[in-house]
Image (cartoon, rainbow, N blue to C red):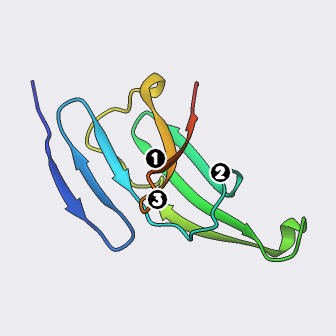
Amino acid sequence: VVLYDGYGVAKTYSWTEDEREMEVQVKVPKKTRAKDIKFVVKPRSVDLRLVTDNDNNDNQNSTVLLLLDGERQLRGKVSMDGTFWEIRDMDKSFKKSNNTNH
């Protein structure tokens, strides 16, 4: 059995992990809404992007900011049923969750 645990700080995120769970924290602008987040999880990777519209509903003028690169492989396998993301206001402990069921 191989157990992973630790923590780290990268340029755009920080993370903690143990043998059963991994948590990644990414800072986003205060007015970020759930619909601005594009989250894709695969068995060995997580892709997280912030998509903002520069002009009201015109997709051609969207800005995409890569927060976590899905091309980078994780050391362990992701439990697809136990994966979720949330937007949390760290100042007010406000929490909005969005579960993924694949």
Q: Secondary structure at mark 2?
A: helix
Picture layout, residue 85 above or below residue 66: above
Which residue is drawn at the image coordinates 26% and 43% (left, top)? 75
The residue that disc 3 covers is: 69
Image coordinates of residue 71 in percent, x first then y, are 46, 55
Q: Residues within 10 Å of mark 1 (few under 14, many from 20)?
A: some
Q: Quadrant of the N terminus?
A: top left
Nearest-to-viewer mark from 2 and 1: 2
Query: Separation of disc 2 and disc 3 at Cα?
Result: 19 Å
Q: CA distance from mark 2 to mark 1?
A: 17 Å
Q: Name the residue: 29% across, 69% down.
A: 10
Quarter that holds the C terminus: top right
Element carrying mark 3? loop
From the top left corner, tell me how far across and down residue 49 is, in percent.
58, 59
Q: Amino acid at mark 1?
A: Val
Residue mark closest to the camera, 2 vs 3: 2
At label 2, counting other C-alpha atoms closer than 10 Å, the crowd grade (few under 14, some 14-19, many 20 or more) is: some
Q: Are marks 2 and 3 in contact (CB under 8 Å)?
A: no
The tally of labels here is 3
Instruction: Of the two numbered discs 2 and 1 on the same chain, state the one appearing first in sequence.
Output: 2
Q: Which residue lies under the disc numbered 1?
A: 46
Q: Amino acid at mark 2?
A: Ala
Relative side of 40 to 57, left or right: left
Marked residue nearer the N-terminal end (2 or 3)? 2
Hey, what amino acid is under mark 3? Asp
Asked whether the residues under the numbered discs 1 and 3 touch, taking CB atoms below 8 Å apart as contact, a structural biologist would say no
Q: Which residue is mark 2?
A: 34
Where is residue 46 shown, x and y percent of the image? 46, 47
From the viewer's perspective, is residue 24 above or below residue 9? above
